[in-house]
Image: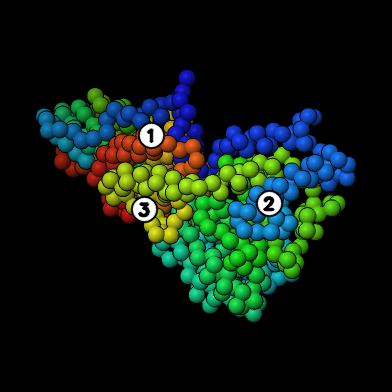
Amino acid sequence: MTSAPIYLDYAATSPVDPRVVKAMAACMTRDGVFANPASPHSAGNQARRVVEHARAQIGALVHAAPERLVFTSGATEANNLALRGMLSGGGQLVTTRIEHRSVLDPAEALAARGVELCLLDCDREGIVAPEKIAAAISPRTRLVSVMQVNNEIGSVQDIAAIARVCREAGVPLHVDAAQGAGKVALDIEGWGIDLCSLTAHKLNGPKGIGALYVRPGMALEPLISGGEAQLGVRAGTLPTHQIAGFGQAFELAAGPGEAQALQALRERLWGRLGRIPGARRNGSPERSAPHILNVSFPGVEGESLRLALEDLAVSSGSACTSRSAEPSHVLRSLGLSDILAESSLRFGVGRFTTEGEVDSAADRVMTEVTRLRQVSEGAPAWCSS
Amino acid sequence: MDYSTEVRQRFSAPTRAGEISAGSGELVEGSAADTSLAVWVRFQVQIQSGTIRQARFRAFGCPHTLAAADRVVALMEGRPLDDLRTIDWQLLARQLELPREKFGKLLRIEDALAACHAQAKRLQVS
């Protein structure tokens, strides 16, 4: 029997909290709240109340009017809806080079259909200055899209300042908050965000459910049609159990002390990994989400590092790209060479991570990095830079 | 990426990584690298009376590269020097179940062995 791997990939996804499972289970079986929330009978009304309760739980965490949330299959669909929905008529999209593929891929697809694409560089810590966004906005700009927390390096953008810039220019702002919600402060309506993508599974909620916040007055072209649609932009029967889990997960994430606990675990991990000679922390130490740590280990080939540490559940980059041979576009944007980008690992801590797991993981990394460096002793300098 | 049992074993516990400590016989070295493939290999071979007495390697590269270098070194010991040029690379690739996209890395290993052989011939240690 093999033991379960140490799970430090919470930025990819997280295990569902048993309290969330309980909320979901109550909405699935014949004796539960399983009815279609759009049905006018009492069972449907009961399901609708569950959905409305979840809306309120989600809205409370991110400071958004519950009725402005459009449920989607996740943040990927929400990002697609925001971009494709806003730019179907053409115009310019201003975004950054370090966005998630669920923004960059639809952006490139739109560009192939004539949308003007403006991709902004970040600095070496993964931060995009609001002034840079202000300078990029033109009369043709139809949307600015910026992620709140980078999923690979954890850098946190100053969304309040970026929203101010967009408001002054009269351009709508979309924020991908898949990694940020529940981890760092997010005030959707207070900051004046127009569209905001959310997901449940990064916060110990279920996969397959997310939402797009849509400010009143935003005109979006639907991606999915077929019957009654939420705010006129997304059709389909609402999955009551998923939404109930989403709401419960967001309510739990609002609990006190969670972000501080995650940060303490992450710093404990870095405190140990930082002792490995040459280990380099990627991203911004000052402006980073509490749960993500990205470290490069010069002198170690990436694929070998991943195999050597296969008993650790960590990512070698974005979860969506870690099976591909391409080095991370985010790390490249920070100026890392392909070899150094490949030798990088992303660690993500979460609610169920223990200090013991962090210590064991750091020991494993130290052992394997040391071993692989011994095998490559005397290698040319390019192997480490 | 899938790895064969032998690749996993040789990668996690290579038997001949390192350097040859001083001893009788002539030492020759050969290395090769390819930055585009992120691979570097160096072999060290001790030759006595035309026979390879010991061999060791150092390598930077993927698990297949490390495993192939370890296996090649194990194959060489006790064989005539000229056998450095007669390794059946296609057979080795099959035995290690190397994916086709890794064949370029095998060529670098072959280059490093050829460099060893050339140095031995220059020094006339055979």
Q: Earlier in the sequence, mark 2 or mark 3?
A: 2
Name the residue nearer the viewer: A324 or A228: A228
Instruction: Using the numbered discs, state the Cα–Cα distance from disc 3 to disc 1 in whole angstroms.
Output: 22 Å
Q: CA distance from mark 1 to mark 2?
A: 36 Å
Real-space Cα separation, disc 2 to disc 3, in angstroms: 38 Å
Q: Amino acid type of disc 1?
A: Gly
Residue A90 position in % (x across, y down): 71, 70
Q: Do tags 3 and 1 sit on the same chain?
A: yes
Residue marked by disc 3: A281
Indicate the chain on which mark 2 is placed.
Answer: A
User: SS of the residue at dot 1?
Assistant: helix
Give the numbered dot on residue A356.
1
| Residue A206 higher or lower than A190, as above or below | above
Report whether A309 appears left or right of A98: left
Q: Is residue B20 above or below residue A68?
A: above
Above or below for A163 versus B40? below
In the structure shown, which secondary structural element does the residue marked by tag 3 occupy? strand
Secondary structure under tag 2 reads: helix
Residue at 18%, 43% in the rendered image: B122
| Left or right for A201, reference A271 | right
Amino acid type shown at disc 2: Ala
Percent across and percent down for residue A114 are 68, 69
The residue at which mark 2 appears reads as: A56
Residue at the outermost top position: A1
Judge if badges 2 and 3 mark residues of a common chain.
yes
Residue A226 in sight here: yes
Q: Which is nearer the eye, A118 or A85?
A: A85
* Amino acid type, mark 3: Arg
Which chain letter goes with mark 3? A
- Residue B74 is drawn in which quadrant? top left
Q: How many marks?
A: 3
